[in-house]
């Protein structure tokens, strides 16, 4: 059935859905990078790093849910296969091959900085044409800025 909620969107809806699926792919990769990082990390301040990585993993999974719900409201389909994540991602995936706390923190800071840029771009794309996605992108952007700040604070304590 036609959706009124889709009719009121003032940007190209297909382009918007494709941007949301790119962000969704980023979130799943970020989720796994944090989740597996929290499992393998060792070294100085391990416990604090595990707690932070685990908390951020949960946030990224929640972001994925917000994006998937919005894609469905817009009449789109959230990415259905994990192999698509690598094709669509803005920010990629860095395997925590060096399990020491410092390189793991640095990898994830890099990921957050990319995410901040990506959500700034998404929020600009929807600012005029889609207030709902605008609100969602600002809410996620706020979390990513907090994530970057949390990781930098731990890294500064370590260095
Ligand atoms: Fe996120
Ligand atoms: Fe984040
Ligand atoms: Mg945190």
Image (spheres, rainbow, N blue to C red):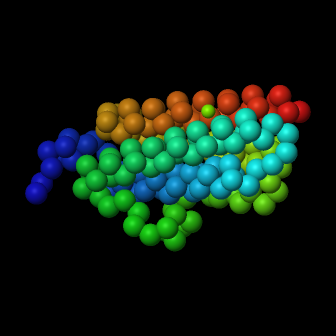
| Quadrant hosting residue 94 | bottom right
| Residue at 85% in and 33% down | 158
| Quadrant hosting residue 157 | top right
Q: Which residue in the rendered view is the most extreme toward the left?
A: 1
Which residue is nearer to you in this view: 53 or 5?
A: 53
Relative horizontal placement of residue 71, taking residue 45 as reference (left or right): left
Q: Position of residue 24 (x, y in %)?
A: 46, 53
Which residue is nearer to you in this view: 7 or 93?
A: 93
Q: Which residue in the rendered view is the most extreme toward the front?
A: 47
Determine if residue 151 is in view. yes
Determine if residue 91 is in view. no
Q: Position of residue 40 (x, y in %)?
A: 74, 55
Q: Position of residue 141 (x, y in %)?
A: 52, 35
How many discs appear?
Answer: 0
Relative horizontal placement of residue 29, taking residue 43 as reference (left or right): left
| Residue at 69% in and 42% down | 50
Q: Position of residue 7 (x, y in %)?
A: 18, 46
């Amino acid at each position: 059935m036609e959706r009124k909620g889709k009719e009121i969107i003032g940007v190209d809806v297909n382009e918007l859905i494709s941007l949301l699926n790119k962000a969704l792919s980023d979130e799943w990769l970020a989720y796994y990078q944090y989740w597996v990082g929290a499992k393998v990390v060792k070294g100085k301040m391990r416990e604090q790093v595990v707690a932070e990585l685990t908390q951020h993993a949960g946030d990224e999974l929640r972001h994925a849910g917000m994006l998937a719900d919005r894609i469905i409201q817009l009449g789109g389909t959230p990415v259905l296969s994990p192999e698509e994540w690598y094709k669509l991602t803005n920010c990629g995936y860095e395997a925590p091959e060096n399990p020491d706390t410092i390189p793991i923190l640095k990898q994830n800071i890099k990921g957050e900085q990319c995410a901040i840029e990506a959500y700034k771009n998404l929020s600009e794309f929807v600012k005029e044409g889609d207030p709902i996605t605008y609100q969602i992108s600002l809410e996620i952007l706020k979390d990513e800025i907090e994530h970057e700040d949390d990781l930098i604070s731990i890294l500064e304590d370590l260095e």
